[in-house]
């Protein structure tokens, strides 16, 4: 057997079994062999399933294209545009099964209709076009969602309404200025004030711009080894802190010793140190080990010194 995996509970993009293909060095992007691409089949896809919002003074095919028919008057009304996309479902508002994969959400929807009036889709400061919410009973848009049989009482005759009940987004258009069509220059003159409420139903999407979280630094663990535990006065005892550890930087640690019953003295530094105990008594040797970020740990070791 060469490979046995379900690619769900194991593996990853760095898995050596995931071969990403290769390109010839003198023509990157041109002559490439096809390879595997790692997809987390068991996890939620990082496709866009999202609302897109923008102030639209005009729509590309309406200000000059006039409702896509050059004899028609200008159709699309300026305002606050709310677009919905579900890349996992596909692309476009045609060619996919209902409901659309991308579609403007309609400020004055006609649930169940496959030929809705989208010229009034934009939200405006008008009393009947200023609110959107997917909280509670939510928003029900044009078209149908065959996968949904939960009828919206507001549109009781639609058996399979396309309902938005994500507890994610709610907004109210407070005011709009420049809300006539045009001018024809590309930046338009539309501006507005919109109040948003964002709920717990909104997911997170990683566009790759975030700063990666730096892993948390842990403190070292100080350890002391000594050449003796009980000595006679005047004997040199050697100490080693070499078995001290640190998860992140085990080779970059500072060692500070104190011989004098733990007083905060810097009697010696370095991984190895030694000391002559001249007087009888019990001495607590301390080793303070710190990492480059300043996190530290202290170990103690008791030396008993007897009279000569
Ligand atoms: Ca409409
Ligand atoms: Ca305008
Ligand atoms: Ca550390």
Image: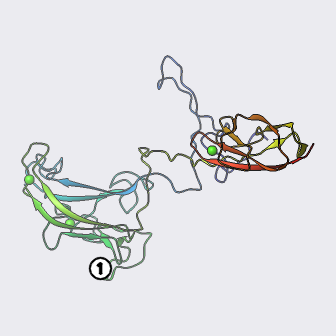
Nearer the observer, 194 or 119: 194
Q: In the picture provided, is 151 more to the left or to the right than 234? A: left
Nearer the observer, 21 or 234: 234
Residue 47 percent location from the top left of the image: 45, 51
> Can residue 155 be seen in this snapshot?
yes
- Residue located farthest toward the top when viewing the structure as drawn: 26
| Location of ligand 3 given as a quarter of the image | top right
Q: Can you say which quadrant of the picture contains the C terminus? A: top right
Residue 14 percent location from the top left of the image: 62, 39
Residue 191 percent location from the top left of the image: 13, 55
Residue 295 percent location from the top left of the image: 60, 47
Q: In the picture provided, is 135 more to the left or to the right than 243? A: left
Q: In the picture provided, is 107 more to the left or to the right than 270? A: left
- Eyeballing the image, is 34 above or below 147? above
- Eyeballing the image, is 164 above or below 8? below
What residue appears at the point 76 percent right and 34 percent down from the top-left corner? 272
> Can residue 72 be seen in this snapshot?
no
Q: Can you say which quadrant of the picture contains the N terminus? A: top right
Label 1: few (<14), some (14–19) or many (≥20) C-alpha neighbours in 10 Å: few
What residue appears at the point 14 percent right and 67 percent down from the top-left corner? 125
Q: In the picture provided, is 252 more to the left or to the right than 198? A: right
What residue appears at the point 40 percent right and 63 percent down from the top-left corner? 202
Number of marks drawn: 1
Does the Cβ of the disc 1 residue fall within 8 Å of ligand 1? no
Nearer the observer, 242 or 88: 242
- SS for dot 1: helix
Which residue has dot 1 on it?
Answer: 155
Indicate the quadrant where residue 118 lies.
bottom left
> Tell me, what colour scheme is on the image?
rainbow
């Amino acid at each position: 057997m060469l490979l046995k995996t379900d690619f769900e509970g194991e593996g990853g993009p760095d898995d050596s079994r995931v071969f990403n293909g290769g390109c010839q060095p003198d023509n990157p992007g041109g002559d490439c062999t096809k390879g595997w691409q790692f997809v987390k089949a068991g996890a939620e896809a990082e496709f866009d399933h999202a609302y897109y919002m923008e102030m639209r003074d005009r729509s590309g095919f309406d200000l000059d294209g006039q409702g896509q028919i050059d004899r028609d008057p200008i159709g699309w009304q300026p305002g606050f545009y709310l677009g919905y996309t579900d890349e996992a479902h596909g692309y476009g508002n045609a060619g996919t099964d209902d409901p659309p994969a991308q579609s403007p959400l309609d400020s004055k929807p006609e649930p169940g209709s496959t030929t809705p009036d989208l010229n009034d889709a934009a939200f405006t400061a008008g009393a009947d076009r200023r609110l959107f919410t997917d909280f509670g009973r939510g928003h029900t848009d044009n078209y149908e969602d065959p996968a949904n049989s939960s009828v919206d009482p507001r549109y009781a005759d639609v058996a399979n309404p396309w309902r938005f009940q994500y507890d994610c987004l709610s907004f109210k258009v407070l005011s709009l200025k420049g809300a006539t069509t045009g001018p024809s220059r590309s930046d338009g003159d539309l501006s507005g004030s919109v109040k948003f409420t964002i709920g717990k139903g909104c997911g997170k999407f990683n566009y790759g711009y975030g700063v990666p979280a730096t892993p948390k630094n842990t403190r070292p663990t100080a350890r002391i080894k000594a050449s003796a535990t009980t000595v006679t006065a005047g004997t040199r005892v050697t100490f080693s802190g070499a078995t001290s550890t640190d998860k992140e930087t085990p080779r970059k640690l500072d060692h500070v010793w104190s011989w004098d019953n733990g007083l905060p003295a810097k009697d010696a530094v370095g991984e190895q140190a030694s000391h002559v105990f001249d007087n009888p008594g019990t001495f607590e040797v301390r080793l303070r080990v710190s990492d480059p970020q300043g996190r530290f740990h202290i170990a103690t070791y008791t030396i008993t010194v007897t009279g000569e």
